Image (spheres, grey):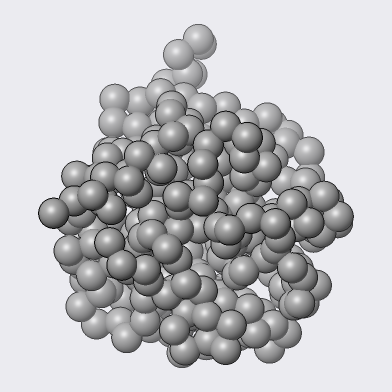
Amino acid sequence: MSSVDLAPNNPYGLPLRAPVMTAAGCLGFGVEYERIIPLKHLGAIVTGSISLHGRRALPPLRLVETPGGVLSVGAWRDPGLTRVLCEYAPAWAAWETPVILSVAADHREVAAALEGVEGIAGIELTFGDDWSAAVRVVAAVRAVTLLPLLVKLPLHARLIATARSVVDAGADAVTIAAPPRASAADPHTGELVHGWLSGPAIRPLVLEAVAEVCATLPAPVVACGGIVTAADAQPFLAAGAIAVQVGSALLANPWAAVRIAEALENAP
């Protein structure tokens, strides 16, 4: 398949050699896998989400299997900005594959420190449950950096209007969708646990949302939700997504995104 650009109107641009990316967090910060997986076959790597000062994962992250996916309970690892700049970015600068830093908090402060940093090709902004602040945050981030901005939005009733608004505020592309809230029984205690659902269970919902947004949004759309195989990815691309992100599939098979990229490249 031909290369694509996630930020065609941005002075930096964000070209991908393949329309397959990793989703935030599911391949860590990439450095954990660079000696195992041929990362150069991927279009881009989206890192784990960070904040300005980082945090200890309290409660620690747990992954609870469900019939159609996996429930993430607790907090993903957040090393903070200083460690990213001192330890990870120098490694990323030597890679052929662009790295997009996921930022989940302190958005403006983190973005202001990234301009001109080698190894960081773009930023993906996430908002947790507070998606209503997305437009304000995007405008604040755009005021301090020219770096390509992706905005990861959850599924909700005003998704199309929100996607348009964040693009108007300065986003170069939108990612659909952030994992929805869900619950499951703890396999050890039977107690109800709450978290975020990812995996094949959400794929039909995300596909519907991607198709609707692509039909009206004059900006690149990246699809994320339950993509495990190239056959899963193709309907999203046919619906208008410029690229796909592979997430929970990487937790079971770290090669999944590479295999999908290779299959799409060889597809007739």
Judged left or right of residue 78, residue 206 is left
Snapshot quadrant of residue 85: bottom right
Judged left or right of residue 203, residue 71 is right
Q: Looking at this rendering, what residue extends furthest in the top direction?
A: 188
Residue drawn where x is 68% and y is 30% of the image = 60
Q: How many marks?
A: 0
Q: In which quadrant will I find the N terminus?
A: bottom left
Task: State the image coordinates of residue 249 (x, y, percent, origin top left).
Answer: 39, 35
Which sits in the foreground, 13 or 236? 13
Up/down of 126 relative to 199, above or below: below
Up/down of 95 relative to 5, above or below: above
Task: State the image coordinates of residue 28 (x, y, percent, origin top left).
Answer: 62, 41
Snapshot quadrant of residue 255: top left
Q: In which quadrant will I find the C terminus?
A: bottom left
Judged left or right of residue 63, residue 117 is right
Up/down of 69 relative to 171, above or below: above
Q: Is residue 243 visible?
A: yes
Task: State the image coordinates of residue 71 (x, y, percent, origin top left).
Answer: 45, 33
Which sits in the foreground, 150 or 94? 94
Residue drawn where x is 40% and y is 23% of the image = 65
Residue drawn where x is 45% and y is 58% of the image = 43
Q: Looking at this rendering, what residue extends furthest in the left direction?
A: 268
Which sits in the foreground, 235 or 119? 119
Task: State the image coordinates of residue 241 (x, y, percent, origin top left).
Answer: 29, 67
Q: Is residue 177 visible?
A: no
Residue drawn where x is 43% and y is 29% of the image = 253
